[in-house]
Amino acid sequence: MDPAFKWIGGATAAIVLLFAGVALGSRAFADEEPAPRLKAEDVLAMGKPAKDAPTPAITAEGLDPVTPPPGEEAPSPSIAENEPFVIKRVLDIREPIKYGQWFWDDKGVPDGPLVMTVDLEARVLSVFRGGYEIGATAVLLGTDDHPTPLGRFPILTKERHNVSEKYGNAPMPWTLRLTWDGVAIHGGSQVENGYASHGCIGTPDEFVSRLFAIAKKGDVVIITNGKKTGVGQSLVG
């Protein structure tokens, strides 16, 4: 059987699975009935704005830039730069994740390093603990004028009740700051199709509150664009 490929950053892997010839439902439990297949052209059209669609409305503002405290040292990353962080499980999600949807299942998952992935093409954030995917949600991302940056980012700070003075005291609860110039994962966003951010990763409050509860400074967030991997393969590199 072909490996159940998925986007790094999301269990909304229907496009990849279709092209790989694998039903999404088969990746977790071999004895279950296979999930119904979607047409490739239908999946490719999901979440894609029309060519003449209006510019997305900005609903997730950017954080205020801050200066690191004097003597502040960068937190130790949850995984080393070249560590082969292998995917051991992906959530059994049977269709593309819609805006506003989120999934969480950490039952029976052992302790291990926490790694988050965000893929700009999939528009999904995934949470892995010790290689096991425990959460996934559709997210808001930046625009061409205010892009979400690519790369590896250890969480710099956790700010439970953050607000942005730069954007009219907009509430940004459960902030996980990734850069000192204002990029973060946070709540308080209207996660709907047609909306975007100033570069932050806007998530549903119910999801990000769970993530905030287990994340710590140094946990790594990997932001990619169209990256694909699969169970038994490395999450990084």
Image (cartoon, grey):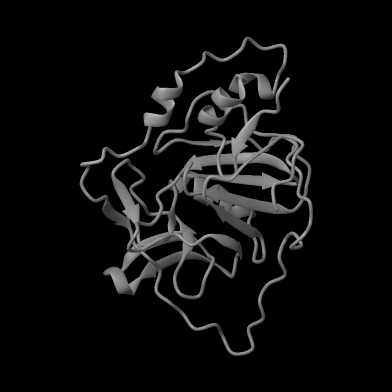
User: Vertical placement of 69 versus 219: above or below?
Assistant: below
List x then y, in percent, for residue 113.
Answer: 74, 53
Picture layout, residue 45 above or below residue 49: above
The reply, left or right, for residue 118 in relation to residue 193 is right
The outermost residue toward the bottom is 70
**Could you say where residue 177 lies in the image, as x and y percent from the top left?**
52, 66
Q: Position of residue 48 (x, y in %)?
A: 35, 37
Toward which corner of the image does residue 71 lie, by quadrant? bottom right
**Viewer-proximal residue, 131 or 41?**
41
- Image quarter in which the N terminus is found: top right
Residue at (44% x, 64% y) in the render: 161
- Above or below, 178 against 94 in this view is below
Where is residue 77? Give x, y as percent.
71, 65
* 79 with respect to 67 (left or right): right
Q: Residue at x 63, y 57 (%)?
A: 215
Q: Residue visible at 38% across and 54% down? A: 188
Viewer-proximal residue, 79 or 22?
Answer: 22
Picture layout, residue 182 above or below residue 131:
below
Quadrant in which residue 60 is drawn: bottom left
Viewer-proximal residue, 2 or 128?
Answer: 2
Please state which of residues 203 and 89 is positioned toward the viewer in this rendering: 89
Instruction: Give the total number of marks visible in the rendering.
Output: 0
